[in-house]
Amino acid sequence: MHAALVHMRHGPSGGTERYLDQLSAHLARAGHEVTVVCRSHGAPSHPSIRFRVLRSPAVGGAWRMWAFARDVERHLAGEGYDLVVGLGKTWSQDVLRLGGGSHASYVELAHAETLSPLERALGKGRLKNALALAIERRALRPGAYRAVIANSRMVAEEVRARYGVPEERLAVIYNGVDIERFHPRLRGGPGRELRRALGIDPGTLVVLFLGSGYGRKGLSELLEAFSGLAGEHGDLRLLVAGRDSSQRAFEARARRLGIERACRFIGPRSDPETCYAAADLYVLPTRYDPFANTTLEALASGLAVITTATNGASELLASGAEGSVLPRERGPELLLAELRAWSDRDRLAAASPAARALAERHSEPRAMQETTALIDDLTPR
């Protein structure tokens, strides 16, 4: 069949972009004709993949998003694709994958935490959120899709409750992880070298936070909880990796809490696998993540994970042997209690093989096989 995969951006970085690259290659290798409909793109993941660029003039990110969705609708009306898979904010597709979850849930649970007080007062993001919500309502209205893929049960429940998506048209397919790139064996090489470069002794317990958008990912809550643990546990470090335009404000908060010496901000890195290899425990108290890929990356690296019920990936931590899940309604004291419980080295050592085994059951090839099986079951339109 001739399949169109639709997303504004095709490139080497980003969770959805990586998924797009993998899915297009998987379909092409299976013998399907694949066209990626986008606004910009990088090199194809398979030589037979073609690109169709839709780039109407638009000023600002909000209007670029809307213009692309409108352009996709017009383009598809004149083409003979057998199946259209949407991976972003568009309303014209047979299969919609909600890799970013429900935008309505993001606005309710997390958007305000991404803004400074001044930005909140000025209403930053109001237009873009309004347009994104309009696209979401249109994409999930009855008759607009043949199947919806959610990457967690949390997201599936959200769209079922908000938009009445029938259960028979919903599929939950968890994200996959590169189990070779993220591996416990890196602890003995790159992980040890990063510790040495940061002046961290081999015997020091390292807690890792990794993510862009510190407010949404819950770094403030972690800093407060960590300050309580640091007062009890002297041989302890918090490693903060990732990008945020307000990093200096979070560094100042760490100073006010008296943990500036125990807390290292190392910024964005192109080698997250090395960060996991240098750590003993991964903590992500996110306010909303449909499925935080870092959860699986940490597990694949042999780390126990503390995260929240508002992270769809927390559904994988069913047994408690590989980490802990904080409830939606919580405070820093609950996170402190979990940090205290997981600072036991014997417990961490016991969790490592269980974490790795869990990640191996959720590899990238498995996610691609489940997605293509769903696509193959849909007859051409």
Image (cartoon, grey):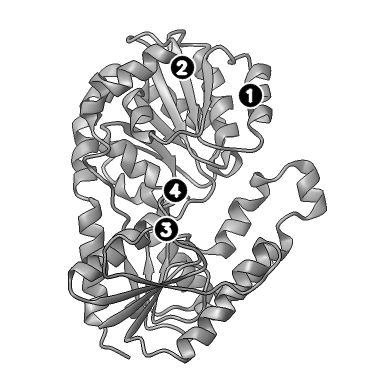
- Mark 3: secondary structure: loop
- Mark 4: secondary structure: loop
The amino acid type of the residue labelled 1 equals: Glu
Left or right: 300 as drawn, with respect to 133 = left
Q: CA distance from mark 4 to mark 1?
A: 27 Å
- Depth check, front residue: 333 or 90: 90
**Residue 33 horizontal/vertical position (percent):** 27, 78
Please identify, in this view, whether the residue under mark 2 or under mark 3 is nearer the observer: 3
Which residue is tagged 3? 42
| CB contact under 8 Å: marks 1 and 2 | no
The amino acid type of the residue labelled 2 equals: Arg
The amino acid type of the residue labelled 4 equals: Ala
Q: Specify few, some or many for label 4: CA neighbours under 10 Å numbering under 14, 14-19, or 20 or more.
A: many
- Quarter occupied by the C terminus: bottom left
Which residue is tagged 2? 237
Left or right: 346 as drawn, with respect to 255 = left
**Residue 74 horizontal/vertical position (percent):** 53, 86
Label 2 vs 4, first from the N-terminus: 2
Asked if residue 189 can be seen in this view, the reply is yes
Q: How many marks?
A: 4
Please identify, in this view, whether the residue under mark 4 or under mark 3 is nearer the observer: 3
Which residue is tagged 4? 309
Classify residue 214 by image quadrant: top right
**Residue 172 horizontal/vertical position (percent):** 32, 65
Q: Residue at x 51, y 78 (%)?
A: 139
The amino acid type of the residue labelled 3 equals: Gly
- Quarter occupied by the N terminus: bottom left
| CB contact under 8 Å: marks 3 and 1 | no
State the mark number for residue 251. Answer: 1
Residue 174 position (above or below residue 282) = below
Left or right: 48 as drawn, with respect to 214 = left
